[in-house]
Image (spheres, grey):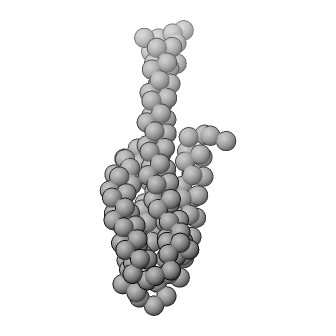
Amino acid sequence: MGDQPGERPRSTHPGRTAAKAQHHAQIREARRTAYLEFLEQAHITGELYYRLGDIYMQLTQPDEQLKKIQDLRTALRDAYDPLARCARVVLLEGPEAIASAAEAVKQAVTDANGALWEIAQDTPDARSRFDSAHQVFRERLQSFIETARATTGSP
């Protein structure tokens, strides 16, 4: 069918067109789910980063601060694996632009977590490096959100 004069071309067959539309909808939904799960994990990480400011504001003794910073580092380690897993799913779902944006967020998390480790080691200027790394995380997360919107066609 579709090869004879007067017949409908194969590419416009209603069944094929509907199946193709359904397939595209499934891809879009799988991507949207992957992006939302990644954002959820990034949000958890971002909330943990804000706790560092609370530690410095609420506690004045260095040993108390160090204990809470160590607790924060533990929570961030626990949050990293789900974030990395979600980033891998985004990588698989694609497209390339969003996969790159997710990888950039994950790298920013790695950098901020490293700066937090430096704070725990009492490395000079570590807090400033953490603040800078946290800012980069927020910027890259915003870029991920914008790329996800463009990819899914959301306003």
Horizontal and vertical percent position of residue 59: 50, 75
Between 5 and 62, the one nearer to me in the picture: 62
Pick out the residue farthest to the right.
155
Quadrant where the image shows the C terminus: top right
Q: For residue 45, say whether it is visible.
A: yes
The residue depicted at 42 percent of the width and 62 percent of the height is 106
Q: Residue at x 60, y 46 (%)?
A: 150
Q: Position of 74 compared to 104: left or right?
A: left
Where's residue 137, x and y in %? 52, 66
The outermost residue toward the bottom is: 124
| Residue 100 visible in image | no
Residue 53 versus residue 28 in the image, above or below: below
The N terminus sits in image quarter? top left
Residue 76, placed above or below residue 32 = below
Front residue of 151 and 19: 151
Is 53 left or right of 87, judged from the image as shown? right
Q: Residue at x 46, y 68 (%)?
A: 108
Q: Position of residue 145 (x, y in %)?
A: 57, 52
Of residues 4 and 13, which is closer to you in this image? Answer: 13
Residue 63, quarter of the rendered image: bottom left
Q: Is residue 127 depicted above or below 153 in this figure?
A: below
Residue drawn at (50%, 54%), measured in percent from left and top? 43
Viewer-side residue, 41 vs 95: 41
Q: Give x and y (percent) for residue 148.
A: 55, 48
